Amino acid sequence: MLILSGRRRGHMVHLGEKTIHIVRGANADVGFIPPDGEPERDVHATMHRAGDSYEIEVMPGCRVWVNGQLVDESRMLAPGDLLEIGQAGPVVRLRAYPPGVTPKKTLAEAFADSREGARVDGQSQLGRTTRFLSNITKDLATQTSLWFRLWVLVLLTALVVSVVILVTQNIRLQKRVAVEGTRIEGIAELLERTGAEAMTRDDLLTLQSGMEARLAATLERIESLEARSDLVARLISSVSPSVAFLQGSFGFVDPASQRPLRYIEAEDGIVVFTLEDKGQELQLMFSGTAFVVSKEGLLLTNKHVAEPWQDDPQVETITERGLTPVISRLLAYFPGVKAPLELRVVKVSTQADLALMRVVGSMPNVTVLQLEAEQPRPGDEVLVLGYPLGTRGLVVRASTEFIEAITPNGDVDLWTIARQLSEADYIKPLATRGIVSQVSEDVVAYDAETTVGGSGGPVVNMDGSVVAITAAIITQFGGSNLGVPASIARALLQNTQHAQ
């Protein structure tokens, strides 16, 4: 008899005697004892040998089910019969094996036995399912033939290998879909921005002629302003050498592997983004303004210049997929200094749109601009210095001969344009004059004109002290502009110097 439920599940009892008593012990366990044994409880049923099988006789007041049918006093048993001893009681199965043969279950027998044992032992659907999985695993591992277990092991190994392969392929597919999906969600615009890093001679000439008309009134006003006021001219002359043009690029890396995001453009125009070592790195250009605030080579600018990916919806389509934006290259061009200087970001403010950068290597001999301790007052005159429109704004102020000279072979990238502009002494900040209109602890508002690229530039009073740092601008030279008060910048600078 094979016990299928209870604590003794899986235990096999060999029946040799002519008469066997079936008793129910503690915890609904079942026992088989000869007539001369001492039962723990009253006999529930008795089995009598009848040829090659047994006849079961149920004691008065007790119940036994055979294959789901209630036994009426007695019944002949056949190999494979399932016996349930009492209502929801232990379950046993009668099996016959030739003498000397070690009992081994077939797959069908293991499945049937596990199911019946789970039906009795499980109190809920989840419990029955859990018990069945436990039973079938144990039976297959211990009560089937060796050859069967070897085949199961081979099949399980093959299944595990297949699952690993499928999971790996699925992960790769998900990465590919995720990266390629960014093109649908806006990454095409990022790719277009990488293409804008190179310009032809016709592009530069068109840019110069188009922007020159828009800037003509502003430039004429500045020249007239400088001619009328020696004070303003001297102020611009003294402050400008300390105001640097920033040019940089950033890409994206996978934090786990530190591999950069690359792209491959096929002949059919489909762009594939990948982290593998093939294709071209995705690099996005940016520019801004900074100015010198310490003799040790610290430059002050905006946080959104030091971290140009801030508030960029196209960039968010990539960062949302777990990639991290990283500055790849950051250069500073000072007026009168032909070679660019490499920069690194030192500290980014968590409370204001400010950041500090440091020159890597030797610092040129330029004046340190002083940060004003007192807030400006509405009505105060101020000068705003910076590099609006970035490289393109500088090209507009260059000569046509210069443009033709730097484009002998057609395309020229923005890095080369900036270097050539510096060598030709075209790197000079644009200065505009205005009036402070509103002041608070967090913001200084003024009407001096600037635009994109002017972010991070100093706003100086008529004494040459910095009263604010340009932060929020109205594009295309219109409306009021906003700056971060110099008092906030002073606190950031002092904390950084003390930490060092």
Image (cartoon, rainbow, N blue to C red):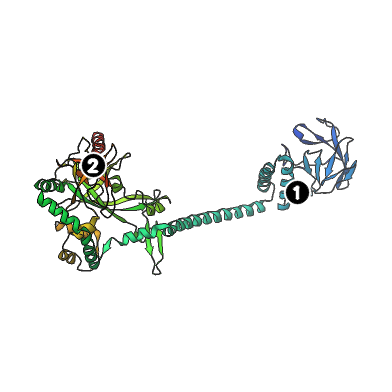
Q: Amino acid at mark 2?
A: Ala
- Residue 93 in percent (x, y) is at 78, 45
The foreground one among 91 and 424 is: 424
* Residue 187 to residue 495: above or below: below
**Which mark's residue is nearer the viewer, 2 or 1?**
2
Kind of element beneath mark 2: strand
Please tell me the numbered disc located at residue 58.
none
Front residue of 404/114: it is 404
Does residue 412 sit above or below 310 in this rendering?
A: below
Spatial separation of the CA atoms under disc 2 and disc 1? 96 Å
- Neighbour tally class for label 1: few under 14, some 14-19, many 20 plus, Cα within 10 Å: few
Could you tell whether 33 is left or right of 432 in the image? right
Tell me where residue 220 appears, x and y as whole percent: 16, 56
For label 2, the crowd category at 10 Å Cα-Cα, with few meaning under 14, some 14 to 19 and many 20 or more, is many
Q: Quadrant of the N terminus?
A: top right
User: At 27% across and 50% down in the image, what residue appears?
Assistant: 479
Q: Nearer the viewer, residue 372 or 213?
A: 213
Height in image: 262 above or below 360?
below
Q: Which residue is mark 2?
A: 468
Quadrant placement of the C terminus: top left
Q: In the rendered view, does 436 fall on the left or right side of 148?
A: left
Q: Secondary structure at mark 1?
A: loop
- Tag shown at residue 101: 1
Question: Which amino acid type corresponds to the residue marked 1 in the rendered image?
Answer: Val
Visible residue check, residue 419: no
Q: Would residue 285 be visible to someone looking at this image?
A: yes
Give left or right: position of 170 versus 211: right
Sooner in the amino-acid sequence: mark 2 or mark 1: 1
Q: Along the line of sight, which residue is nearer the eye, 284 or 92?
A: 284
User: Residue 438: percent from the left, percent from the top?
Assistant: 26, 41
